[in-house]
Amino acid sequence: MNSSPVPDHPRPASLTDLFVSFTLLALQGFGGVLAVVQRELVEKKRWLTREEFIEEWAVAQVMPGPNVVNLALMIGGRYFGLRGALVALAGMLAMPLVIVLLLGLLHAHYASYPGVAGALRGMAAVSAGLIAATGLKLVGTLQSHPLKLPLSLFFCALGFLLIALLRVPLLIVLLGLGGVSCVLTYRKLVR
């Protein structure tokens, strides 16, 4: 993980910019914000390179709590310290909380309607597609990984097999497979 800002990177102009950016990210992220976060932070705002995004996302995923909230804390902290982390967190949570409460009230009244149930199932399929598309877009960054592309793809496939098909708990996969890949990567880096 890179803990200091890279000088030639654009960075948030202010805490307000950070808050507004994460609020807009959160408002676009119904059903999964990963695809939106990657596009906004890497491709549009360029606050992170793809490689930095992968590194930060990996750390955010291993930490307890929602991945994207962890990522917001890390990026806010990277540029503005503790104040930035708290502002990014507030940006991620404030407006979505209000919207979720309102939608929860609507769902309680209208969930039994077949049209509403069908719409919710359709949204779940789109959400899964967004996550898969983002994963495919980020595969290219594995070419510069110290383990090289074939071994990195092997770990990806093995992770998918263990979690999606064999239903091994995520924590066990993270500690086992993640631990092995970390050790192998470390050994490649120190040579």
Image: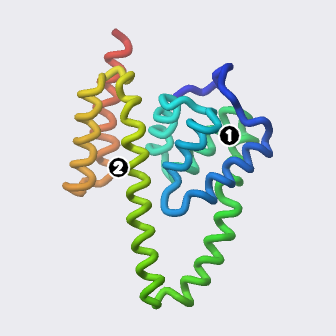
Looking at the image, residue 52 lies above or below residue 125: above
In the image, taking residue 104 as reference, residue 122 lies left or right, namely left
The reply to whether the C-beta atoms of the residues labelled 1 and 2 are less than 8 Å apart is no
Looking at the image, residue 116 lies above or below residue 41: below
In the image, taking residue 161 as reference, residue 123 lies left or right, namely right
Pick out the residue farthest to the top.
Answer: 191
Residue shown at 66%/59% (left/top)? 93
Q: Quadrant of residue 41?
A: top right
Pick out the residue farthest to the left.
Answer: 166
CA distance separating discs 1 and 2:
26 Å
Q: Quadrant of residue 124?
A: bottom left
Residue 32, percent from left and from top: 49, 57
Q: Earlier in the sequence, mark 1 or mark 2?
A: 1
Helix, strand or loop status at disc 2:
helix
Helix, strand or loop status at disc 1:
helix
In the image, taking residue 177 as reference, residue 118 lies left or right, namely right
Residue 94, percent from left and from top: 70, 61
Q: Residues within 10 Å of mark 2 (few under 14, many from 20)?
A: few
Q: Quadrant of the C terminus?
A: top left
Residue 37, percent from left and from top: 56, 46
Colour setup of the view: rainbow
Question: What residue did someone put label 2 on?
Answer: 171
| Residue type for callout 2 | Leu
Residue shown at 29%/54% (left/top)? 169
In the image, taking residue 33 as reference, residue 44 lies left or right, namely right
Residue shown at 40%/48% (left/top)? 133
Question: What residue did someone put label 1 on?
Answer: 76
